[in-house]
Image: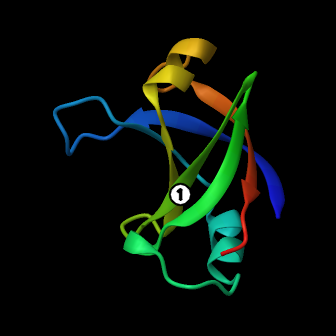
Amino acid sequence: MRVEFEGEIYRWAARTDSWYFVNLPADLSAEIREIPRPYRGFGSVRVNVRIGGSRWRTSIFPDAGQGTYVLPLKRAVRDAEGLVDQAVVAVELDVLDA
């Protein structure tokens, strides 16, 4: 399943170090939850991601408070793409099978 969306980057306030995320849209999150797969730690789902010229493999995680999945943005990608807190970013995401 390949999807594209735009989201606002935000810093996770629960940690003192710099963790940045983008929320997936609610409708997309609902579709991903419906895909049958074995349970993985924290309910994570493996994905391949592209933002600008950066590509990487990671996992998205459910955020119970918002009912969406969240995509972590590692520092190397933020630096390479010039991503900053509260910027809107275009994301291409491939949801991987099990």
Point out residue 83 in the picture as x, y percentages from the top left corner: 55, 19
Seen at 53% across and 61% down, the residue is: 69
Point out residue 30 in the picture as x, y percentages from the top left corner: 65, 75
**Rendered position, 86 above or below 95:** above
According to the image, label 1 marks what residue?
60
Q: Quadrant of the N terminus?
A: bottom right
Picture quadrant where residue 88 is located: top right
Picture quadrant where residue 38 is located: bottom right
Confirm whether residue 97 shows in the render: yes
Q: Quadrant of the C terminus?
A: bottom right
**Rendered position, 85 above or below 14:** above
Seen at 49% across and 67% down, the residue is: 44
Confirm whether residue 82 shows in the render: no
Q: Residue furthest left?
A: 16
Point out residue 79 in the picture as x, y percentages from the top left corner: 51, 14
Seen at 83% across and 57% down, the residue is: 2
**Rendered position, 80 above or below 19:** above
Point out residue 86 in the picture as x, y percentages from the top left corner: 48, 26
Task: Give the amino acid at mark 1.
Answer: Ile
Looking at the rendered structure, the secondary structure element under dot 1 is: strand
